[in-house]
Amino acid sequence: MPDQIQELYRIAADDIGWVTLKECVAVGVIALTIWAVAFQLTAATLPHIPPAKGRLAFYIEAAPVVLGALPIVAATAGQLASRPAEKIGEVEEVGSIFRIQDQALAFERSMLLILALAMLILLASFVVFAWQIGSKHRSAALANRTNIAYFIPYRFLALTIGGIALLTIGFVLFPDRLAQFVGSFGVIARFAMCVAGLTTHFALLTIRFNFPFIPVVFGGLFLVASLFGGDDHELRSVAGATGPSEEMHISAVEAFRDWLRQKPRLAEAERLGEYPVFIVAAQGSGIYAANNAARFLARMQDLCPAFRQHLFAISGVSGGSVGSVIFAPALHADDAPLDTIGPDAKTCPKIADFLAGVGRAEDIDAPGEVEQRVASVLETDFLLPLVAGLLFTDFTQLFSRLAIPSFDRARFLEYTLENAADRILNQKEAGDQSNLLKADFQSHWTPSNNMPALLLNATDAGSGKRVVVSPFDIDPLHAKDKDLCILSMLDRAGTGANQTVKSHSLRIPLSAAAFTSARFPWVTPAATVSLRNDCITANPQARLVDGGYIENSGIETALDLIERLNSIKGTSDAPKFRIRGAMRKRFR
């Protein structure tokens, strides 16, 4: 096993105790909150009903304990159900990213079993504690005094609402760090406490005044939300940007020609007789696809340092888009010029040495610099900020007619990805690299910057067309009868053969472009884009969702691009080249 993997296991093992303690405390808080609310309401209700005896009295006493125990039971079952299946009799080839992944999954199986055992211990402790406390008569008296002192007075209802507002502001100001610090169950525990606090206030007022406050208040709020609720899911623009870019899009053919005619590529094309060009298609499948797309590209770059200067474009969909965008700043951190690789250097030195019998299998298995940077981003928990945004900010936004962009849960994902990329830059010992993910999408690629062009596929929910976020135009005429459109602002002039089309890119960050391709309902909302583009829609706004709704492999856009690029073969102003097909990365 490589030393790097052993080090990762050691770090993970050191974190088990902290993760287990944090999760157990959070689940315990959720259980205690539900039990306390049920006990408070039971204590307030008992004086208004005939005294219970026998089995009924037992049921009333046990109900709060059972309700409180349910979250712990669910957490225990979830830990056991999520354990990865063990592979028996399968041997992965040397250098495969799946080999390293399977080693990590084996470690996860043990860790999840430990967490499940910890949850069982927590469950037993909770049941004993709650039953002992709930069975004492003075506990019911204390609950009634608490109801009278805190939950019934209106001023404390305002205090509860103020606490919820402060917690919401905290998640807005620290969209990733706060959620990642408290953990997944910690976020849910805080939401449970907020909901429990509000519902307890209204439930006790219902008991006191014999008026259905909960259905009236919450039903009224949801009615207002459904009739007048605003849309806070506008696609984010680069900070300070007020409109589309003044610079026009160039065509894919023109971009490819400029890319090929860079001096190092011309020299290599002359030396080899033709220039090899790669176009990668990375398909979607959520975070699993993002992980494997990023690691595959990074592993290729580490094993074959010249890979980047032959990689013209990556067509990504959904998780594949996110993985491609994670690969981009890891590659950009090197800032390697085109002429870094000498003409006599081995294309893939580690593989060549291994095949020649002078290299070790461990050298191929070991993650290189680019893959280590990718791994540092992938170890980020992207789910936690998303859950926090959904439960606090987006939930609050439901009841506001005024759109609050910072409450959009999709932005929590974007900020988390950007902050994770900052770690890559901080790991660099020299040089001050700007964060590519925070910059304008258009700036990530030029013909000379030795970076692949990212083509990120989305779907317009209204027209059902494939919408590609691209640094150049695949079809310079943006034909309205085609199913492929570029996300840009269009200006058409003339008709028929005399028609001209000017295309301007939208000023959106690279991180926003990545998650626009991965907008899957219930996880991330559809992105609203205000634009003038009659190829996509005749409406002033488009609603963009996951590109996998139309085509989940990314291969269609890659083939459309290849068809355009091959049109300049044999022309006098382009060196001889060969596109090695579209490599479709399949994920098991």
Image: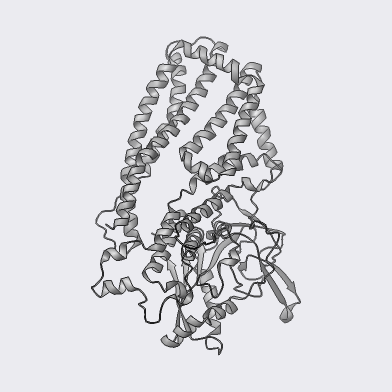
Front-lying residue, 397 or 341:
341
Looking at the picture, how far across and down is residue 332, in whole percent? 49, 65
Look at the picture and state if 308 lies above or below 188.
Answer: below
Quick check: can you spot residue 552? no
Give the percent coordinates (x, y) of residue 295: 41, 61
Image position of 175 (left or right of 120): right
**Position above or below: 216 against 236:** above
Residue occupying image coordinates x 51% and y 58%: 318
Q: Is residue 523 above or below residue 552?
A: above
Q: Can you see residue 46?
A: yes
What residue is drawn where x is 65% and y is 27%?
158
Name the residue at 47% across, 56% down: 426
Vertically, is 64 above or below 19? above
| Image side of residue 437 versus residue 581, left or right | right
Q: Quadrant of residue 65?
A: top left
Judge by depth and name the residue closer to the eye, 318 or 405. Answer: 405
Total labels drawn: 0
Which residue occupies 39% across, 24% down? 127
Foreground of the two, 101 or 545:
101
Residue 99 position, x and y percent, is 31, 59
- Expressed as whole percent of the image width and height from the top left, the position of residue 182 reads 48, 38
Answer with the quarter of the image where residue 531 lies: bottom right
Name the outermost residue toward the front.
Answer: 430
On the rendered structure, is 495 left or right of 37?
right
